[in-house]
Image (cartoon, coloured by chain):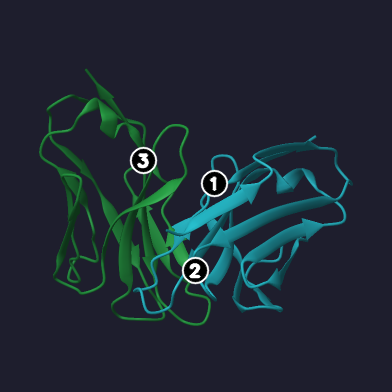
Chain colours: A cyan, B green
Amino acid sequence: AQTIHQWPVAEIKAVGSPLSLGCTIKGKSSPNLYWYWQATGGTLQQLFYSITVGQVESVVQLNLSASRPKDDQFILSTEKLLLSHSGFYLCAWSLMDWGYEQYFGPGTRLTVL
Amino acid sequence: GDSVTQTEGPVTVSESESLIINCTYSATSIAYPNLFWYVRYPGEGLQLLLKVITAGQKGSSRGFEATYNKETTSFHLQKASVQESDSAVYYCALNSGGSNAKLTFGKGTKLSVKS
């Protein structure tokens, strides 16, 4: 069975500090991977997607970057956090022949102070 | 761009009562997007509840149903008799495909079921 793990579970960080969030998918070969973000009281929106190792496309510009160093790993990062980065970050995977349904990890709660 | 509008919460219903959470969508890049309902139970991650990829079809899961109505561009979630365990946040979403297969979500509807 496939599993998706995100780390850390929660972070409290200072404005201007760096950030790295991770996601690992086990049990699926070459999945499509996605990062989503939900600000408090806001709507879930897609930030990045990746269909293969080493290739990441940005969907929304939020002064964040993403990388896919391995087939089963997706990293979200920034060198300088903003207050507006606070929220809930979700990693998801899909296989393109499954009607575009996506399966989500447990998420990371980020608070920027 | 694509958009999804759903019932604003919170919604409170008594156990064994019926439920409907409204969802309407607008898809600009494709005539018939794939439609989904996701659910987040307290303390858990976002889970796929049901999906329908063909207009006119009905999806069902855990006693919930939703019918893909292309005429009214709606995908309302219904349950005949709710239970306390159905308390959760429900999200309607659409996927227009494309290279990024972006899910466009509604704002979510928080449902509380009273015993």
Which of label 1 and label 2 is nearer to you? 2
Question: In this view of the protein, which residue sits in the foreground, A110 or A68?
Answer: A68
Question: Where, by quadrant of the figure, is residue A91 drawn?
Answer: bottom right
Query: Residue at 54% of width from left, 46% of height from top?
Result: A42
Using residue A47 as the reference point, say whether residue B62 is left or right of it: left
In the rendering, at what x and y percent does residue B35 appear?
A: 31, 65
Label 3 resides on the chain identified as: B
Query: Residue at 43% of width from left, 63% of height from top?
Result: A102
Using residue A12 as the reference point, say whether residue B9 is left or right of it: left
Question: In this view of the protein, which residue sits in the foreground, A6 or B14?
Answer: A6
Label 1 resides on the chain identified as: A
Cα separation between marks 2 and 3:
36 Å
In the rendering, at what x and y percent does residue A110 appear?
A: 69, 41
In the rendering, at what x and y percent does residue B96 appear?
A: 40, 75
Tell me if label 3 and label 1 are in contact, CB under 8 Å: no
The residue that label 3 is drawn on is B8
The residue that label 2 is drawn on is A28
Query: Residue at 80% of width from left, 50% of height from top?
Result: A19
Residue furthest to the top in view is: B115
Q: Which mark is residue A42?
A: 1
Secondary structure of the residue carrying numbered label 2:
loop
Query: Residue at 77% of width from left, 43% of height from top?
Result: A83
> Which comes before the other along the chain, label 1 or label 2?
2
A26 up-or-down from B99: above or below? above
Secondary structure of the residue carrying numbered label 1:
loop
Q: Amino acid at mark 1?
A: Gly
B40 up-or-down from B34: above or below? above
Using residue A46 as the reference point, say whether residue B80 is left or right of it: left
Which of label 2 and label 3 is nearer to you? 2
Q: Amino acid at mark 3?
A: Glu
